[in-house]
Amino acid sequence: MSATAHAHGHAPAIWPPDRQFGLVRPAKLAMWIFLLSDWFSFAGLLLAYGILRSNSSVWRHAGEPAFAVPFTAVLTLVLAVSSVAIIRAFDDSVSSNRKGTQLWLLVTGLCGLLFLAGQYHEWSGLMEHGLIFGQSAYASTFFVITGFHGLHVVAGLVYLGFIWVRSFRGISSANEVQLFELFWLFVYFGWNIVFVLVYLIPSGAS
Amino acid sequence: VSADAQASDSSAGHRLTGRGTIVMLVVLAFLTALEVMVAMSHGPSVLVTLALFVLAIVQAAYFLLVAMGLGHETRIMKRWVALLLCIGVFYSLVLINESVWRSQFWRVLRGG
């Protein structure tokens, strides 16, 4: 390449030094790439929801139950508390405070479990009141989108269990906790969008 | 990656301490409460929807920058993350609007 450049009379290209090169750890960069690809999965589902909803003259049909907004708002706060807990866990792991890390990871996990229990309660309540998957776009999009998010919470809890065991055995690092922290915070980030678009936008039904 | 590099990377990220996390929790709780109040208000549907969109974007941006620490990442990282997030939103909005216009067009055609 260089020989070719010289043969053609061009000087070899000298690129200016990239001051930002290497400042982000590859694992962290990979996690961000994963989260962004996951964001497109969420965006795809929300896009389908938007198209179905904007093209329907009646979104929630008579007889279909409305979502329990205050209850879901409390679940949102539970996830917010878990976000705070995981940030504290990372802070303690950087300070090499193992006990603190384990405690905050435990709080994060308990909040995640509480959120899932709340979702289960909400789903079963809605199904008892006649919201059946496949019955209408209103029902199907609700179950698919919240179910997809719920799968993220389940995956996060499995991931958290792995980190917690490693922390308990004294072999986890702050970087591992940081990667999990990013994933878990993304779970809240996604939920915030889902909460507004699926639960809060007026359905216009009686 | 050496241990030093790893340590510096961890500390270079966001490290919200006790007070910072409480402020964050209060902000998130306030924004969530505001969203619920707006949703339960009896205003015009279009205005309520618009206000909810704005609040969702504000909360998402705050969370990304403060909680997820994007505000402390490198410039190029911030730009790429923002660009890809915006592409998802923009593409969704374009396709939703396109489908609405298409359905309106067919309705007019059938009506005519």
Image: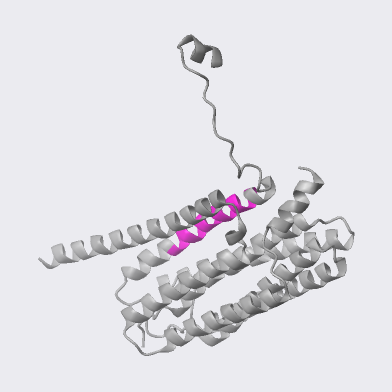
Identify the residue at image location x=46%, y=12%. Answer: A9
Q: Position of residue A159 (x, y in %)?
A: 73, 60
Residue B88 relative to residue A161: left or right: left
How many marks do you count on the picture?
Answer: 0
Quadrant of the rendered structure where residue B10 is? bottom right
Identify the residue at image location x=36%, y=61%. Answer: B93
Give the position of the N terminus of chain A as an image quadrant.
top right
Quadrant of the rendered structure where residue A21 is? top right
Q: Nearer the viewer, residue B83 or B110?
A: B83
Quadrant of the rendered structure where residue A59 is? bottom left
The kind of secondary structure the magenta stretch mainly shows is: helix
Q: Position of residue B80 (x, y in %)?
A: 51, 50
Q: Position of residue A48 (x, y in %)?
A: 41, 62
The magenta segment: A30-46
Identify the residue at image location x=81%, y=67%. Answer: A101
Identify the residue at image location x=58%, y=39%. Answer: A18
| Whether residue A124 is visible | no
Q: Residue A169 lies in magenta, yes or no?
A: no
| Whether residue B59 is visible | yes
Give the position of the C terminus of chain A as an image quadrant.
bottom left
